[in-house]
């Protein structure tokens, strides 16, 4: 997908069908159980428009009626749409701050546990693993990626502003994704395929870090 900060080539595929497929895959992997998680695709940048999952939907059974088109303020664009995800403002924030085409939020066991264990440290580094090369722009295992952790909050607008401020202070800390404490992962990509790959890479690496802790090698 060819894109820039100012413009985005609309996807030629069916974004709803691909997001439904994503939900089914993540549910099968145990990363989006129950009604947890939310996913979005950037449809347009000027003005900003996203297609995002509606609130409270079972991600294993998403259908065409389970999505909402929202503007840059997280408000539904069309009438008679379902309520968008409670975390819509995090998606619009990321679409505003990064030249990306898709944003995915998951609730895995390892991500949830690590977000709690390392919260007091502000995050944790993942280094030396070959799978790091699955993240955009990384060409060697001899690297380190920092995973920032933010405290959970029901005030999504305030949380979004905390994340925005951190992105401006230290952009490299939020290059690929972040965790919310006792909650889950947010990651993104140039398009949905890239974002899904980043979820898979992070979840593999989270399990490696978590299993090392259980083995006493943290």
Image (tube, grey):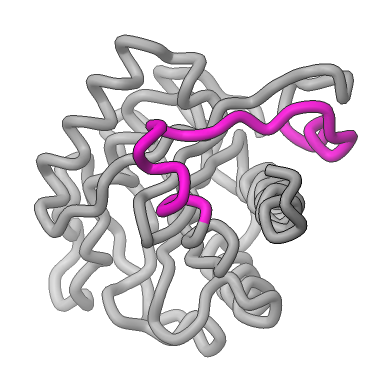
- Identify whether 149 is placed above or below 185: above
Residue 193: in sight, yes or no?
no
- Residue 202: say if magenta: no
Residue at 21% from the left image edge and 64% from the top image edge: 86
Q: Is residue 21 left or right of residue 94?
A: right
Q: Position of residue 27 (x, y in %)?
A: 61, 79
Q: Is residue 78 left or right of residue 122?
A: left
Please identify the residue farthest to the front as the structure is shown.
216
Q: Position of residue 144 (x, y in %)?
A: 70, 21
| Range covered by the magenta-colored residues | 114-135
Please identify the residue farthest to the top as the structure is shown.
169
Q: Nearer the viewer, residue 130 or 186?
A: 130
* The N terminus, quarter of image: top right
Res 57 quadrant in image: bottom left
Residue 148: in sight, yes or no?
yes
Q: Nearer the viewer, residue 198 or 96?
A: 198
Q: Nearer the viewer, residue 94 or 118?
A: 118
Q: Is residue 216 left or right of residue 89?
A: right
Residue at 51% from the left image edge and 15% from the top image edge: 172
- Identify whether 100 is placed above or below 86: above
Q: Nearer the viewer, residue 151 or 23?
A: 151
* The C terminus, quarter of image: top right
Res 72 quadrant in image: top left
Residue at 14% from the left image edge and 54% from the top image edge: 75
Q: Position of residue 106 (x, y in %)?
A: 50, 62
Q: Is residue 209 left or right of residue 140?
A: left
């Amino acid at each position: 997908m060819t894109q820039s900060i100012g413009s985005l080539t609309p996807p030629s595929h069916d974004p709803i069908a691909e997001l439904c497929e994503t939900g089914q895959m993540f549910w099968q992997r145990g990363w989006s159980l129950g009604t947890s998680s939310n996913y979005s695709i950037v449809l347009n940048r000027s003005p900003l428009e996203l297609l995002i999952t509606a609130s409270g939907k079972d991600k294993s059974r998403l259908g065409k009626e389970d999505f909402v088109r929202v503007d840059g303020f997280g408000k539904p664009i069309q009438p008679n749409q379902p309520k968008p995800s409670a975390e819509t403002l995090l998606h619009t924030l990321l679409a505003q701050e990064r030249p990306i085409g898709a944003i995915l939020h998951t609730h895995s066991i390892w991500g949830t546990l690590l977000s709690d264990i390392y919260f007091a440290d502000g995050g944790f580094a993942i280094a030396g693993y070959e799978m790091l090369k699955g993240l955009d722009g990384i060409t060697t295992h001899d690297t380190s990626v920092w995973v920032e952790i933010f405290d959970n909050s029901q005030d999504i607008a305030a949380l979004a502003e905390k994340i925005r401020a951190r992105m401006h202070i230290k952009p490299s800390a939020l290059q690929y994704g972040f965790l919310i404490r006792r909650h889950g992962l947010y990651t993104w990509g140039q398009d949905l395929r890239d974002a899904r790959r980043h979820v898979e890479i992070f979840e593999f690496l989270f399990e490696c870090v978590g299993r090392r802790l259980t083995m006493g090698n943290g």
